[in-house]
Amino acid sequence: MESTLKDIRDGASVLDMDPKSTVGGGVEDVYGEDRATEDQLVTPWTSSVASGFSLLRDPQYNKGLAFTQQERDAHYLRGLLPPATVSQQLQEKKLMESIRQYQVPLQKYIAMMELQERNQRLFYKLLVDNVEELLPVVYTPTVGEACQKYGSIFKRPQGLYISLNEKGKILEVLKNWPERSIQVIVVTDGERILGLGDLGCQGMGIPVGKLALYTALGGLRPSSCLPITIDVGTNNEQLLNDEFYIGLRQKRATGQEYADLLQEFMTSVKQNYGEKVIVQFEDFANHNAFELLAKYGTTHLVFNDDIQGTASVVLAGVVAALKLIGGSLADHKFLFLGAGEAGTGIAELIALEISKQTKAPLEETRKKIWLVDSKGLLVSSRKESLQHFKKPWAHEHEPIKDLLSAVKAIKPTVLIGSSGVGRAFTKEVIEAVTSFNEKPLILALSNPTSQSECTAEEAYTWSEGRAIFASGSPFDPIEYNGKVYYSGQANNAYIFPGFGLGLVISGAIRVHDEMLLAASEALAKQVKEENYEKGLIYPPFSIIRKISAEIAANVAAKAYELGLATRLPRPGNLVKYAESCMYTPTYRSYR
């Protein structure tokens, strides 16, 4: 991946520190909120000590009926609440019962977002304690529908909106955000939201959802997370004609106008928050995603979850699957449907890992990997017409126009879908893959569920129960011929929260491919024998915070090894240090 990006940036590496692009800065827990143990008292600061009605309206400190009688006296809450005092556990039980009564996933999503806006710690307590049940609610697949209807369900802003109207004023806009100590920014321009296309300003649901997972799964403080949408217009006619649309009503800005706005944004972010703030690019269109990652990878701490996060989580699943399908990574042949950000990013990381294991040149290991785009198999005769990020995957072969023909010609052992085309893995395709593999590995990664290349039921039925299957969106267990089959979810939420935590605890100033490989390695090691017995190639989400701590430690260790870490001295036990830095959502007692 780094080698591809180096070609775009004229050979520059993330390890080449440009002193002109380096500025001071950093973040800290100013008020000691998360350094305090749970039995220590903290002060509920806003711009002053919050009390009375303002305290009940402050989601960071509001506890609802969990305020003790002493706290009600000390903070002028007497009479503003009913007399009953309840525990956080009882509040959690009540809310989960309420959420479970909703039959429509979007209703559950709205209920969770409303909770986040009024009681932050209770929101994260629910999410941490019920992660397997609520993850599909606050993120994929429900967040896709939420983005589509964001204008209709919009009530209160949850992040920063930077549009073309703010050109020349972006630094001022960043200063309008009430929190000063920002550790991670998730930013989108809304052009390629999941597999749903251009949703413009309504893509804000993605940064909000991602950062909720950064806190719940990776333990970053909510106050250190900043969701941002950059609104340069939309080419979605349906939205432009929607009276409830909340963004700019114009066609997308492109070219120099777009580049100038992004340049001002990236410069302002570093100026305001320092060198060590993570900027995660999310759901940018292919043509911008690679350019932005290449341009800013050597000057900023940037990460693209669609390219790098997806690649890392899929590599972890493939490595774990070797125990079920046999052989080493180098023994397998890979065929992708989809040659965009996700497909080429995954392919590059797999090639890098094979190169690392076998000491073979990257150019050679790439030849084990084939990609199919909308025009057919990537082959050398198409090279001149291909986008730059596709060219390394154009191998010598006769042209092939469709996926089924490509499967029959290439005979892959691993079939990976990242196309955003629902049901593209037809019965004929899966039967063909199964015909020359005892246990084919099939990964249908596209989100949301409607865009998945096939369902779990289709994969298991058409392969006669022989496939090892995982998907981007969750599927329920399937019964086939009297046996229950479980499918894993290749969800980026396994990787990016722990990856971000690793960058923060090490004080990393750049992201390197070796750190992505380290994250994959840590995740693959968390798959245990009881998971393999069910045919799973990912660990359960119920232990995700433990997984995130292990990933963070591996990533931090690699950052120190590469000389990219600034937090010195290096902690002796990185796993324990990572765990000690994680935000916990239990209520604190107030003075």
Image: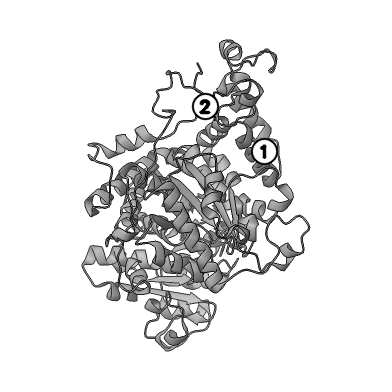
Q: Vertically, is 69 above or below 453? A: above
Amino acid identity at mark 1: Ala
Amino acid identity at mark 2: Trp
Image side of residue 250 versus residue 205, left or right: right
Quick one: label 1, few (<14), some, or many (20+) residues within 10 Å? some
Residue 251: x %, y % from top left: 66, 69
**Is label 2 in a helix, a strand or a loop?**
loop
Residue plotted at (52% across, 26% down): 45
Please name the residue that numbered disc 2 is placed on: 45
Image side of residue 519 versus residue 170, left or right: left
Q: Earlier in the sequence, mark 1 or mark 2?
A: 2
Residue 572: x %, y % from top left: 22, 36
Instruction: Identify the disc placed on residue 325.
Output: none
- Of the pair 538 and 566, the residue shown nearer to us: 566
**Is label 1 in a helix, a strand or a loop?**
helix
Residue plotted at (47% across, 60% down): 306
Residue 124: x %, y % from top left: 53, 34
Please name the residue that numbered disc 1 is placed on: 111
